[in-house]
Amino acid sequence: MTKTRNSKQNSSVEVLVTGDLCPDKCGYANGTGRMLNESMEDIFGRLAGTMKNADVVVANLEAPLVAKGKPIIKCGPNLKADPKFAQAMKRCGYDVANLANNHIRDFGPEGVVSTVRELEKVSIPYFGVGRTAEEASKPLFMTRKGLKIGFLAFAENEFGVVDEYGWGAASMDPAFNGEAVQAASKQCDVLLVFLHGSSEYFPHPSPGMIKRYRYYARCGASAVIVSHAHIPQGWEIYQKIPIFYCLGNFMFPWPTPPNARRKCWTQGLAVRLFLSKTKPVKFEVIPLQSQYDKVSVDILPPARRKAFEKHLQSLCKTLQQPKKLQRLWHDRYVDRGSNLIKRIRNLPEGYRSHADLMQWAILENMFRCETHHEIVMKYLHLLRNRNISKPKKA
Ligand SMILES: [Fe+2]
């Protein structure tokens, strides 16, 4: 693809960041084929021009690029995409790939290695993964129009993170991430920190996760961009640093129509960041509409944009209302927490089969994943203090 980046008209560096990108869903949708063969306008609609004009387009690639391989034992689906998708990304103008997410290791460390090899073949730099925790937490630097931009990424401690078995995502770990962010921020003009976590399908980030994400801003990020919840969660300017709590899905075709829980599946956000040495970072949020049954995304049409923008404003307002947020999350803790506890009660006696191990993985994830941990802990705390208006059967 020929970029039409306009370096003379605008002195700032424009970085376009999009939400979760999973083009194939294990062969369900031919995202790779479409992006290799069809026009940008056919696939990305009116966003195509924005992608072509941006100085840097960042992908949040939420699937390993691997032909075969063995799915790991985990809870949730094992995702992968065609290795040729790296070529498709290159053709569509992606400049850099963020790989720190909960699916990048769905086909083991080998799947992560395959992904980085495919990206290297087409000269797309990546960040957020490595063979060790230290390597995964190293920043990527890129210079555009004389501005040095740093990229760092960390994912919640689900099954995608690096461990003693090899390649994986950098883990969200305040004990070490703070130093990594501080050090990286001193080596560049602008540091973008990407985080992957939060409660899925809920429009508000949890109080615990807000606390965590603000910490990255205080450590030296110029902007913090979060993904994973499959739903936009608003944004705020915190101590002059924009924090985008969740961009939602960018392109994530799925075999079945979104149900009530996943009704937000096809609505996401892109963010245009206008970077310079001046703070705070300026930005524009673009509401997007994708399709669950095909590889297609477009800017939300004007007729539907007004209502969605009103909804987004309300989400942003709620972020500044801690008591309201606490109330909303009280109910969420009870609802999700009681569900998770029910799952513990249904655990098998032993772990003889693959299915048994997958059940036990649910329990493991309750301890290791920050959001699930927060939910279970808060639910049990509310339960013990009889602060649940309608106790659920646990
Ligand atoms: Fe995710």
Image: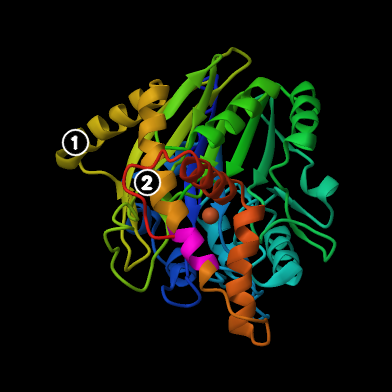
The residue that mark 2 highlights is 268
Q: Is mark 2 within 8 Å of ligand 1?
A: no
Residue 340 in magenta stretch: yes
The three-letter amino acid code for the residue at tag 1 is Ala
Residue 374 in magenta stretch: no
Q: Residues within 10 Å of mark 2 (few under 14, many from 20)?
A: many
Q: Which sits in the foreground, 33 or 39?
A: 33
Kindly state the secondary structure of the residue where label 1 is placed. helix
Q: Residue at x 68, y 59 (%)?
A: 119
Q: Residue at x 30, y 63 (%)?
A: 258
Segment tinted magenta in the rendering: 339-344
Q: Residue furthest bottom?
A: 353
Q: Position of residue 166 (x, y in %)?
A: 82, 63
Q: Quadrant of residue 75?
A: bottom right
The three-letter amino acid code for the residue at tag 2 is Gly
Q: Residue at x 63, y 71 (%)?
A: 360
Q: Position of residue 289 (x, y in %)?
A: 30, 50
Sequence-wise, the earlier of marks 1 and 2 is: 2
Kindly state the secondary structure of the residue where label 2 is placed. strand
Examine the rendering and report whether any part of residue 67 can be seen: no
The residue that mark 1 highlights is 307
How far apart in space, not on screen, are marks 1 and 2 (Cα)?
14 Å
Q: Position of residue 61 (x, y in %)?
A: 57, 56
Question: Which quadrant is the C terminus positioned in?
Answer: bottom left
Side of 237 relative to 223 (left or right)? left
Side of 276 relative to 343 (left or right)? right
Tell me if residue 357 comes above or below residue 340 in the rendering. below
Examine the rendering and report whether any part of residue 303 can be seen: yes
* Main secondary structure along the magenta-highlighted residues: helix
